[in-house]
């Protein structure tokens, strides 16, 4: 195995320039949610050029590439997503073009975010979420193809997937890939390695999420005679204060994932016009929860508060529901899904985690564990399907969704070897180890 590890490191060094170039080309293509076609085309073209055994786009616009082993074994999905968030105000980018893919040496945080150091990076929107990691996953496939060509026996199937509409958070692309596309193609998956930002650590879970829409009701009146109406915004201010108190009081804590929380993210009112007391206040909350809680229990908590306040004030009325917004893929397919993510985590002792750790140890990479603050599509895999998954990537969480969006090229080289080694180790596991 030692010779294989040396080969993987040599391949990573050899493939690094091509991977960086591919990352730059990815960064130069805008791919906001629902507008990912051109980027999807590039992924498909690149995998075809590298010689993947099968490459396809599904009805929803997700892209998939397969490399088949020479022996039977599990299918390991290496997962990324196509879309990215809006670059925002260009003036905050410090002179960098969000779609430029510029390379330079700059000051960055180290792996543990405890200090800074100088490193070569690639700049651009999506560099840290997730184009840097996705480029490495695609080219890890190239390293596997090299091994196979040299006659090394490979077990199982390497599957690269890049899904649509991840950023809106309903997990539409991932769900449709797993629930519709893979069964239609006669394919299955046994475990997943996500390219979401990890700083080369193994990430083992994150809190769940539910987006809740609260509506506080009032009665319109002329702005010159507010006493004739019920101001929904005024009523909502009392509710907003109480929500913070209630969630703080009831918050649960997981020793690994942290404390449950709530954040008000959007507020507006209707009619929203001059001289009219508003009769509706619409409030959106981002509620994060830990194992032991659920989207349903979070909604119940808010509904009980609304009922309590209505009992105290005959003019107070409010409702709460889980947000569900219609989404349209760039292929024209549409769906509406509840905006929820299940909380999940996998233990360090799980065979899936132990195999990934063994792979990194063999490559001389320090094995460090962590948990995401944000949510990912792995909620579908681990939370719903109860299959094992980890996060591993060259990207750093600190730079996600920020104007300083970047990925370290030295980390990309390590990830190239890491992804390839992880596949080789995971493919050796028996099928019974692929469950939570």
Image (cartoon, helix red, strand yellow):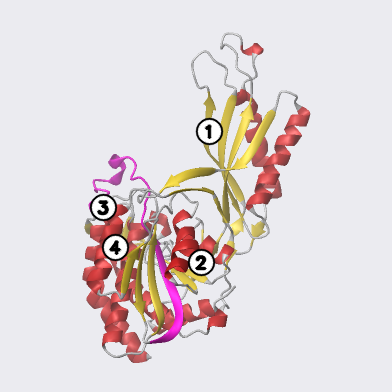
Callout 3: few (<14), some (14-19), or many (20+) C-alpha neighbours within 10 Å? some
Q: Locate residue 351: give its quadrant.
A: bottom right
Residue ID for mark 4: 43
Q: Would you name the residue on which mark 3 appears?
A: 29
Q: Nearer the viewer, mark 4 or mark 2?
A: 4
Q: Residue at x 47, y 72 (%)?
A: 188
Q: Would residue 79 appear left or right of 102 to someone viewing this image?
A: right
Disc 3 versus disc 2: nearer the observer: 3
* Magenta range: 71-100
In the rendered image, residue 423, in percent from the top left (x then y), is placed at 41, 78
> Element type at marker 1?
strand
Residue 153 at x, y = what percent? 36, 90
Number of residue marks: 4
Q: Is residue 97 above or below residue 43?
A: above
The answer to whether any part of residue 121 appears in the image is no
Above/below status of 97 relative to 130:
above
Find residue 171 and report its horizontal and vertical position in percent: 48, 55
The residue lying at 27 percent from left, 49 percent from top is 98
Residue 267's label in the rendered image is 1
Q: Can you identify the residue that label 2 sits on?
A: 370
Q: Earlier in the sequence, mark 3 or mark 4?
A: 3
* Vertical arrangement, residue 184 with respect to residue 96, above or below: below
Which quadrant, please, contains the C terminus? bottom right
The residue positioned 56% from the left and 75% from the top of the image is 348
- Which of pointers 3 and 2 lies earlier in the amino acid sequence? 3
Depth check: 140 or 385 in front?
A: 385
Point out the tag, 4 or 2, that comes first from the N-terminus: 4
């Amino acid at each position: 195995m030692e010779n294989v590890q040396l080969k993987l490191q040599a391949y990573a060094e050899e493939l690094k320039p091509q991977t960086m170039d591919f990352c730059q080309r990815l960064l130069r293509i805008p791919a906001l949610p629902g507008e990912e076609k051109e980027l999807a085309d590039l992924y498909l073209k690149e995998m075809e050029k590298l010689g993947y055994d099968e490459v396809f786009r599904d009805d929803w616009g997700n892209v998939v590439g397969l490399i088949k082993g020479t022996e039977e074994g599990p299918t390991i999905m290496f997962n990324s997503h196509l879309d990215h968030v809006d670059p925002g105000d260009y003036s905050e980018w410090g002179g960098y073009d969000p779609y430029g893919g510029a390379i330079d040496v700059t000051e960055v945080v180290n792996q543990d975010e405890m200090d800074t150091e100088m490193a070569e990076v690639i700049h651009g929107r999506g560099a840290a979420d997730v184009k840097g990691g996705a480029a490495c996953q695609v080219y890890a496939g190239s390293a596997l193809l090299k091994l196979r060509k040299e006659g090394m026996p490979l077990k199982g199937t390497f599957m690269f997937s890049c899904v649509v509409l991840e950023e809106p958070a309903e997990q539409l692309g991932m769900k449709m890939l797993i629930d519709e596309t893979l069964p239609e193609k006669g394919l299955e998956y046994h475990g997943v390695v996500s390219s979401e930002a990890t700083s080369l650590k193994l990430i083992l879970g994150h809190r769940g999420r539910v987006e809740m829409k609260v509506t506080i009701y009032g009665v319109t009146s002329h702005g010159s005679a507010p006493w004739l109406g019920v101001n929904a915004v005024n009523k909502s201010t009392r509710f907003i204060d109480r929500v913070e108190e209630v969630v703080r009081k009831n918050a649960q804590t997981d020793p690994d994932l942290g404390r449950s929380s709530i954040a008000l993210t959007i507020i507006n009112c209707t009619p929203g016009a001059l001289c009219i007391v508003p009769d509706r206040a619409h409030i959106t909350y981002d509620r994060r929860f830990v194992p032991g809680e659920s989207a349903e229990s979070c909604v119940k908590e808010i509904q009980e508060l609304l009922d309590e306040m209505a009992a105290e004030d005959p003019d107070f009325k409010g409702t709460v529901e889980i947000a569900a917004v219609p989404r349209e893929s760039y292929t024209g397919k549409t769906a509406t899904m509840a905006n929820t993510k299940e909380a999940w985590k996998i233990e360090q002792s799980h065979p899936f985690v132990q195999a990934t750790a063994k792979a990194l140890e063999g490559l001389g990479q320090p094995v460090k564990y962590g948990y995401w603050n944000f949510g990912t599509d792995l909620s579908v895999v681990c939370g719903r399907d109860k299959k094992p998954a980890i996060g591993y990537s060259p990207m750093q969480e600190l730079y996600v969704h920020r104007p300083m969006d970047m990925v370290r090229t030295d980390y990309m080289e390590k990830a190239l070897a890491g992804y390839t080694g992880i596949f080789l180790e995971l493919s050796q596991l028996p099928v019974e180890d692929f469950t939570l």
